[in-house]
Amino acid sequence: MIKTFTKSALVLLIVCFTVIAAHAQNVTISGTVTDKASNTAMPGVGITIKGKTTGTATNNNGKYSFSTTEKAPFTIVVSYVGYTQIEKEISGSVANLDFQLESAAILGQEVVVSASRTPERILESPVSIERMGQATLRELPVPSFYDALTNMKGVEVSAQSLTFKSVNTRGFNSNGNTRFNQYVDGMDNQAPGLNFSVGNIIGLNDLDVDNVELLPGASSALYGAGGINGTMLMNSKNPFAYQGASFQLKTGINHVNDDNTGNQEYKQLDVRMAKAWNNRFALKGTFSFLQAKDWQASNYDN
């Protein structure tokens, strides 16, 4: 009885191992990869099992071969830089597959250079960034968006005239501030002969401002030697996103109760036009006109 039981157990174990071996058998995949246009062999092409690290690469003759214990069906991925990726499902135990790859154009995506030179959320920035958007700029009761900069944290503005104001952070301001960078759409707008920005004389008008970003403090590592005290980035509206014609007229009175000049009228006209064609070409034009009496001397002794 014991001998019969032993023989039965041995037979059962042999059957079990046979079934396990059958399930764990290798699947062999081999073939050749060529360029579809020239029909030449392609070395270094990657062939891998989708979602796994198992795979191989073609040799100098474009041939490949590898085995796997992955249970069929599964998918293999054939990929090479500059060519369209191919996926093929394997259902049998032996597969001889040849592939022809087609070249594919690789288009880089536009990168917007902003406060930290890389696109990022302001809350994730390692440095302090002050920002004013279109909604904020429209609501502030100021003659122009440039005057609204005084509402940003840490900003000090020195006014020399109606059109010439020097923006600064972290102290040491002057009539011609060489310690503060000012950029319009990534371009430095300082006057070449003066080595500092002359306010917003050659900047943006109110209708074309998308947002203003300010880095209070040293920023020379990103924006050059002029950023000792800080850097301001003025970004205009994209003509593809903001098309059409728009204008605005601002009027007011200055020198109220001034005995020397009396009440003087202030006028400012801004015009913007933008048009895009087929999302490939666009034109934009802006115009600004300002008329006002800035000041009048009241001491004629000299």
Image (cartoon, rainbow, N blue to C red):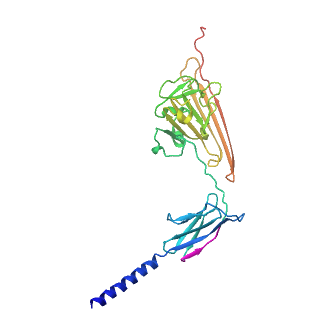
Of residues 11 and 191, the one nearer the viewer is 11
Q: Is residue 23 left or right of residue 164?
A: left
Of residues 116 and 159, the one nearer the viewer is 116
**Residue 101 located within the stretch drawn in magenta:** no
**Quick check: can you spot residue 25?**
yes
**Quick check: can you spot residue 145?**
no
Position in image of residue 26 (x %, y %): 50, 74
On screen, 111 above or below 100?
Answer: above
* View extreme (left): residue: 1
On screen, 230 above or below 110?
Answer: above
Dividing the picture into quarters, in which one does residue 272 lie?
top right
Of residues 50 and 119, the one nearer the viewer is 50
**Residue 98 located within the stretch drawn in magenta:** yes
Dividing the picture into quarters, in which one does residue 78 lie?
bottom right
Position in image of residue 3 (x %, y %): 29, 89
Q: Quarter holding the N terminus?
A: bottom left
* View extreme (right): residue: 38
On screen, 191 above or below 4?
Answer: above
Position in image of residue 217 (x %, y %): 48, 32
Position in image of residue 238 (x %, y %): 62, 45
* View extreme (top): residue: 301
Q: Residue at x 54, y 70 (%)?
A: 75
Magenta segment boundaries in residue numbering: 92-99
**How many badges with numbers are in the image?**
0
Q: Quarter holding the C terminus?
A: top right
